[in-house]
């Protein structure tokens, strides 16, 4: 691995960081070697997950929050995860607007939609977080759609997870079903300029009381108007408070352990599967499926054959 490239990344040089992220998205040996070289320099950044239903205002809020953190002397990077097609015009236009909005602030933004890597989007996002961490960003904001709905559940591995709601979006029972209250460290009712914001806050507060958390941390419910940058100072304060809480209770290490535990298992699954299927032709695979659907053989028998090959 080119040591000049590594030190450029470590210095946070935007072009080098962008190139590193592209490499990580492509995957393969290049990505692997890069992560191996950078890994010793990771573990410092605060990873903040922002999640919520489509249209609740995640992107708008992430931009506004990034600016607030920037004003607090933090070096901020944004990863916007959009698992939908990279060809949807809306996403691309939205990106362009966001980038213009952040121009000249020093805030680094990257959207990821590609599934180029064998490991899929989730693995690419995990590696991207490592790159940005090694690049010396203090805060990495990771925006993902949904909670438990998206294929990318990065939010559950963040040091702090912010869940967005908006008035009128709230089928609150649905929110509880999706386990939102369990993953949220901070709840935000965005679009507080709209009718019904207070009702949504009250509903969330009530749900929190009905489902008392085992944690000592009770997620605050904040109101924001992301479009006007309102409520960002309170949100940044709540993030800082949660960080103090996690540090004092040694939860940061625990969260990290859970994150790498999951990721190592996923990685092993992919690697083992890849190795076992390396020399299996499409025709052979199709033949196995045919044997199964015609009830000649069962799944266990086929799996055993593959494992013992
Ligand atoms: N009235 C009002 N509109 C807002 C506010 N914040 C965001 N919006 C608008 O809500 C719409 C969706 O905002 P986005 O930031 O794109 O929402 P998102 O959650 O990122 O959406 P997806 O990425 O599609 O899931 C946009 O038209 C925003 O301008 C707010 O505080 N008040
Ligand atoms: Mg968005």
Image (spheres, helix red, strand yellow):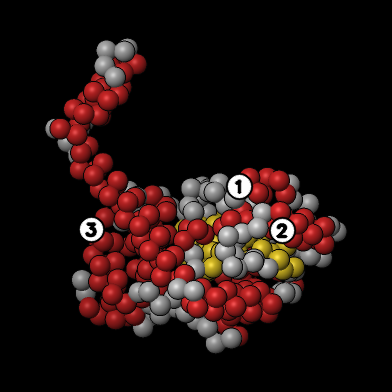
Residue at mark 1 to residue at mark 2: CA–CA distance:
17 Å
Residue under pointer 2: 209
- Residue 41 horizontal/vertical position (percent): 32, 77
Number of dots carrying numbers: 3
Dividing the picture into quadrants, the one containing residue 184 is: bottom right
Q: Residue at x 15, y 32 (%)?
A: 308
The mark nearer the N terminus, 3 or 2, is 3
In this view, the mark in front (3 or 2): 2
Q: Earlier in the sequence, mark 1 or mark 2?
A: 1
Q: In the rendering, at what x and y percent does residue 173 appear?
A: 71, 46
Q: Where is residue 223? Give x, y as percent.
A: 75, 68
Q: Is mark 3 within 8 Å of ligand 2?
A: no
| Residue 188 located left or right of residue 127 | right
Can the viewer see residue 231? yes
Q: CA distance from mark 3 to mark 2?
A: 49 Å
Quadrant in which the C terminus is drawn: top left
């Amino acid at each position: 691995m080119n040591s000049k490239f590594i030190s450029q990344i470590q210095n946070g040089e935007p072009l080098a960081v962008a190139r590193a992220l592209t490499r990580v998205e492509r995957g393969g040996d290049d990505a692997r070697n890069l992560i191996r070289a950078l890994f010793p320099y990771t573990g410092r950044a605060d990873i903040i997950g922002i999640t919520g239903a489509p249209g609740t205002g995640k992107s708008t809020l992430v931009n506004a929050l990034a600016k607030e953190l920037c004003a607090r002397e933090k070096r901020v990077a944004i990863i916007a995860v959009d698992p939908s097609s990279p060809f949807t015009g809306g996403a691309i236009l939205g990106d362009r607007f966001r980038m213009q909005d952040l121009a000249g602030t020093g805030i680094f933004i990257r959207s990821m939609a590609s599934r180029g890597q064998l490991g899929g989007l989730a693995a690419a996002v995990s590696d991207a977080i490592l790159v940005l961490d090694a690049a010396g960003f203090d805060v990495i904001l990771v925006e993902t759609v949904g909670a438990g709905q998206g294929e990318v559940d990065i939010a559950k591995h963040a040091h702090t997870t912010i869940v967005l709601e908006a008035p009128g979006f709230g089928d609150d029972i649905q929110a509880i079903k999706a386990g939102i209250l369990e993953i949220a460290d901070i709840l935000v009712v965005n679009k507080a300029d709209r009718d019904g914001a207070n009702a949504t806050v009250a509903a969330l507060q009530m749900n929190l009381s009905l489902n008392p958390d085992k944690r000592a941390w009770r997620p605050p419910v904040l109101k924001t108007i992301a479009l006007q940058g309102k409520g960002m100072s309170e949100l940044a304060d709540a993030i800082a408070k949660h960080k103090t809480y996690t540090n004092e209770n040694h939860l940061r290490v625990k969260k990290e352990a859970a994150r790498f535990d999951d990721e190592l298992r996923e990685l092993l699954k992919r690697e083992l599967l890849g190795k076992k299927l390396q020399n299996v032709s499409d025709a052979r695979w199709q033949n196995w499926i045919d044997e199964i659907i015609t009830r000649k053989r069962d799944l266990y028998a086929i799996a055993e054959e593959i494992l013992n090959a």
